[in-house]
Image (spheres, rainbow, N blue to C red):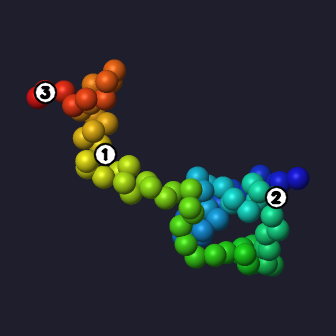
Amino acid sequence: MAINMMCTNSSCVNYWEDNCMKNINEERIEINAEGMCETFEVGISPIYRGQEAMNSESANSLATMGDINSGAAQEK
């Protein structure tokens, strides 16, 4: 059974939206006597892949300028 554990270390590959994915997946997490995570892995969660493209200017312009029904760009 997973214990609700909040994480704020976004530079860990297991971090996603203030959660530890190892905890959510009920995998073993090692915490030392000082409360530091021993199973920390440097990286960015694969869940965030593609976010850069979603944040790009072209993606934003398509999302905000398109016709909601057809997806075609509207005239300015």
Which mark sits nearer the N-terminus, 3 or 2?
A: 2
Whether residue 10 is visible to the viewer of this picture, yes or no, is: yes
Amino acid type at mark 1 = Ala
Amino acid type at mark 3 = Glu
Element under label 1? helix
Q: Residues within 10 Å of mark 1 (few under 14, many from 20)?
A: few
Mark nearest the camera among 2 and 1 is: 1
Taking the spot 51% from the left edge, 57% from the top edge, the residue there is 48
Element under label 2? loop
Q: Position of residue 62 (x, y in %)?
A: 27, 39
Taking the spot 34% from the left edge, 21% from the top edge, the residue there is 69
Which mark sits nearer the N-terminus, 1 or 3?
A: 1
Q: Which mark is residue 59?
A: 1
Element under label 3? loop
Marks 2 and 1, how far apart at CA: 36 Å
Give the residue at the far top of this rendering.
Answer: 69
Mark nearest the camera among 3 and 2 is: 3
Q: Which mark is residue 75?
A: 3
Q: Residues within 10 Å of mark 2 (few under 14, many from 20)?
A: few
Taking the spot 81% from the left edge, 78% from the top edge, the residue there is 33
Left or right of 34, for residue 12: left
Q: Position of residue 14 (x, y in %)?
A: 64, 65
In this figure, which residue is indicated by the disc labeled 2?
Answer: 26
Marks 3 and 2, how far apart at CA: 51 Å
* Among the 4 quarters of the image, the one containing residue 74: top left
- Using the image as rendered, state which of residue 52 and residue 30 is in the foreground: 52
Answer above or below: position of 56 versus 46: above
Whether residue 8 is visible to the viewer of this picture, yes or no, is: no
